[in-house]
């Protein structure tokens, strides 16, 4: 590969990964991920499948009364997934303002207030929960960026109230943000009124119909999943954190899809019948097993190829990397083998995940395996993750085992080539 092209690619990708607004979006999603996982697990527990005669949900209903236990999970859902857009409006604005070293809390609260102002109301004058959640993510991101940029300009202008020295810092910040907040909220209110008069619909509906829905439809396709798998691993090969760089782009697309699947599953729909195949758990559980590159399969391949050798650099790296690899932490093998900028590992590291993406998509879209209905902590080990994300189906485990087998077989020839190349360098 041309060294100038490689250097240019690394430089451009690095700039994209460090772009202030994309970093704020990424960090905003990372900040609320614990809430997303808790909300997803609450749905899973509410609908946990029975093991023979052992029915976990039925036992709990027997203790708390029929249906009462599900109210616990429902309440958790309402405080997490159901207000996802509102949480992101605050979180992205907070992180963006902090990157400018300005009042993060003030920007976050202002963004959340502006978001609520734009949410359509129901006939009984309550906020429409449909737009507080994942359907409002794109509005939340755009609004958080615009409000924060305007806020940081105004907060540094003459349109502020400066308190005398000796006033507590919190009070001084509040008064300093007062006039900028008034101006911004007036602008948001005027915008909302204009939308109602001239468009006859909310900005949520416009953005959802024009941008979000088409992107989600595209994201649920096999070509889109292949592109994501390819780009993620190409970036990693050059030592760039592909997951972080792409995260700010794919999270707004794929979180609403898993939210819809989980919501329908919570309301009694089978995991086979929920609509979306490609979601974040789809990639995490069936493609990125052991981390990017399905490197748990690489570790297995190394141990198979070098099973008769007592000591070898590859084998030592595999032994040291295995405990972390079980929990999808694979930096030790990526940088220790290494995989980064290692031409021998370029082809399998990129094309193993692409192959598993195709296999998984076909298996799920044809109904052989249930679709994903839960988000888990990314450190959840394979096998357990396959069972849980599919709503408690053994077929999820079977798909993971098949994928691991295919990945190991694909990695073995390249491990053998790497071992030979290393031997030649040591002898030379």
Image (cartoon, rainbow, N blue to C red):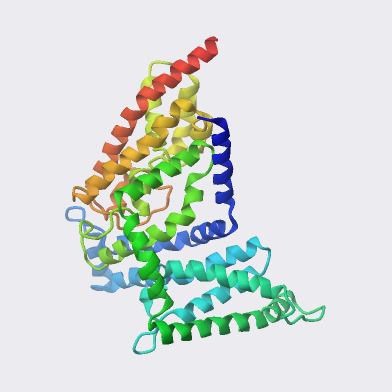
In front: 325, or 46? 325
Please provide percent x and percent y for residue 193: 47, 86
Please provide percent x and percent y for residue 325: 44, 38
Above or below 318: residue 37 = below
Q: Residue at x 35, y 48 (%)?
A: 225
Q: Quadrant of residue 80?
A: bottom left
Q: Residue furthest top?
A: 427
- Location of the C terminus (image quadrant): top right
Q: Residue furthest bottom?
A: 124
Side (left or right) of 175 relative to 298: right
Please provide percent x and percent y for residue 263: 30, 66
Q: Is residue 76 visible?
A: no
In front: 218, or 328? 218
Q: Is residue 335 visible?
A: yes
Q: Quadrant of residue 419?
A: top left
Q: Residue at x 62, y 73 (%)?
A: 150
How many numbered badges does the structure rendering display? 0
Q: Residue furthest right?
A: 165
In front: 54, or 145? 145
Q: Quadrant of residue 372?
A: bottom left
Please provide percent x and percent y for residue 184: 59, 80
Q: Residue at x 77, y 80 (%)?
A: 162
Above or below 71: residue 178 = below
């Amino acid at each position: 590969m041309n060294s100038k092209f490689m250097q240019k690619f690394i430089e451009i990708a690095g700039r994209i990964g460090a772009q202030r607004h994309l970093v704020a979006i990424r960090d905003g999603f990372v900040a609320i991920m614990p809430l997303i996982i808790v909300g997803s697990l609450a749905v899973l527990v509410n609908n946990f499948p029975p093991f023979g005669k052992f029915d976990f949900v039925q036992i709990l209903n027997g203790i708390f009364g029929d249906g009462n236990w599900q109210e616990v999970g429902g309440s958790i859902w309402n405080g997490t997934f159901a207000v996802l857009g509102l949480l992101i409006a605050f979180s992205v604005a907070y992180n963006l303002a902090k990157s400018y070293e300005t009042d993060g809390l003030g920007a976050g609260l202002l963004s959340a207030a502006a978001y609520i102002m734009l949410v359509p109301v129901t006939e009984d004058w309550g906020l429409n929960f449909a737009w507080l959640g994942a359907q409002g993510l794109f509005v939340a991101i755009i609004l958080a960026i615009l409000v924060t940029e305007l806020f940081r300009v105004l907060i540094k202008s003459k349109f502020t109230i400066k308190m005398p020295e000796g006033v507590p810092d919190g009070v001084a910040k509040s008064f300093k943000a007062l006039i900028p907040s008034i101006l911004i909220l007036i602008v948001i209110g005027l915008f909302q009124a204009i939308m109602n008069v001239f468009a006859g619909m909310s900005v949520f509906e416009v953005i959802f119909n024009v941008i979000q829905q088409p992107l989600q439809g595209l994201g649920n396709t096999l070509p889109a999943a292949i592109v994501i798998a390819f780009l993620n691993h190409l970036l990693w090969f050059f030592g760039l954190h592909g997951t972080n760089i792409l995260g700010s782009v794919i999270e707004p697309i794929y979180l609403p899809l898993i939210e819809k699947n989980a919501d329908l599953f919570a309301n009694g729909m089978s995991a086979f019948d929920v609509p979306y195949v490609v979601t974040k758990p789809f990639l995490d559980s069936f493609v990125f097993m052991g981390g990017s590159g399905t490197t748990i399969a690489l570790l297995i391949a190394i141990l198979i190829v070098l099973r008769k050798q007592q000591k070898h650099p590859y084998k030592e790296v595999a032994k040291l990397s295995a405990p972390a690899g079980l929990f999808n932490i694979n930096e030790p093998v990526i940088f220790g083998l290494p995989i980064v900028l290692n031409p021998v590992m370029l082809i399998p590291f990129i094309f193993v995940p692409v192959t598993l993406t195709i296999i998984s998509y076909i298996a799920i879209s044809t109904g052989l395996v249930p679709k994903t209905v839960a988000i888990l902590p990314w450190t959840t080990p394979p096998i357990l993750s396959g069972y849980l994300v599919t709503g408690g189906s053994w077929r999820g485990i079977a798909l993971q085992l098949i994928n691991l087998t295919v990945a190991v077989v694909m990695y073995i020839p390249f491990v053998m080539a790497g071992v030979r190349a290393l031997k030649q360098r040591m002898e030379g």
